[in-house]
Image (tube, rainbow, N blue to C red):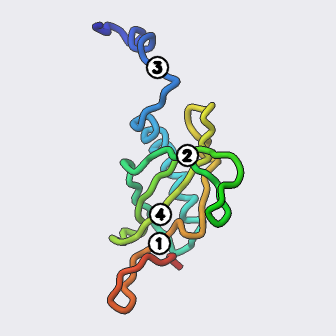
């Protein structure tokens, strides 16, 4: 079917299904808030380099020592680096309510190991928390 007008596209596109490009576009609109949030977690972070292709939605099963607890939930995850450090990583998670098209930018989550760098200890490269 040939689409002649934007309205034709509107009629034939399923807007209830969000694709990765839509998710990336949404996060790019909120890049400043995301970066400011990460910087607020650690005063040594001066810049964040987001890896837009890392965006994904995962189902999470809460657990206690490997034993499932509570209900599964979804979260959107984006990764990147910081301070232009080659072997650095930052991870930002968003609570993702499946009934909503996009997560609220205010639902950003941070864990204690969300900001990491690779260091060499006794000739072995290991990931450590950035302090």
Q: Quadrant of residue 5?
A: top left
**Marks 3 and 1, how far apart at CA:** 39 Å
Residue that label 3 marks: 14
**Element under disc 4:** strand
- Dot 2: within a 10 Å radius of its alpha carbon, few (fewer than 14), some, or many (20 or more) residues? few
User: On the rendered structure, is 95 left or right of 35?
Assistant: right
Query: Residue at left 68%, top 46%?
Result: 71
Q: Earlier in the sequence, mark 4 or mark 1?
A: 4
Q: Earlier in the sequence, mark 2 or mark 4?
A: 2
- Dot 3: within a 10 Å radius of its alpha carbon, few (fewer than 14), some, or many (20 or more) residues? few
**Marks 4 and 1, how far apart at CA:** 6 Å
Callouts 2 and 4 close, C-beta under 8 Å: no
**Marks 2 and 4, how far apart at CA:** 20 Å
**Marks 2 and 1, how far apart at CA:** 23 Å
Q: Earlier in the sequence, mark 2 or mark 3?
A: 3
User: Residue 59 has which mark?
Assistant: 2
Query: Residue at left 43%, top 76%?
Result: 127
**Element under disc 3:** loop
> Which is more foreground, mark 2 or mark 4?
2
- Considering every residue shown, the one lying at the far right of the view is 70
Q: 103 or 30: which is nearer to us?
A: 103
Q: 30 or 91: which is nearer to us?
A: 91
Residue that label 1 marks: 116
Q: Earlier in the sequence, mark 2 or mark 1?
A: 2
Q: Where the N terminus falls, by quadrant? A: top left
Q: Earlier in the sequence, mark 3 or mark 1?
A: 3
User: On the rendered structure, is 118 left or right of 98?
Assistant: left
Q: 72 or 90: which is nearer to us?
A: 72
């Amino acid at each position: 079917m040939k689409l002649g007008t934007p309205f034709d596209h509107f009629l034939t596109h399923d807007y209830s299904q969000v694709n990765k490009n839509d998710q990336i576009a949404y996060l790019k609109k909120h890049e400043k808030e995301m970066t400011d949030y990460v910087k607020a977690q650690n005063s040594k972070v001066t810049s964040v380099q987001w890896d837009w292709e890392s965006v994904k939605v995962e189902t999470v099963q809460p657990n206690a020592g490997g034993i499932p607890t509570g209900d599964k939930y979804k979260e959107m995850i984006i990764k990147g680096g910081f301070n232009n450090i080659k072997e650095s990583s930052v991870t930002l998670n968003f609570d993702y309510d499946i009934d909503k098209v996009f997560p609220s930018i205010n639902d950003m989550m941070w864990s204690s190991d969300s900001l990491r760098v690779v260091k060499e200890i006794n000739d072995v490269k290991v990931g450590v928390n950035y302090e």
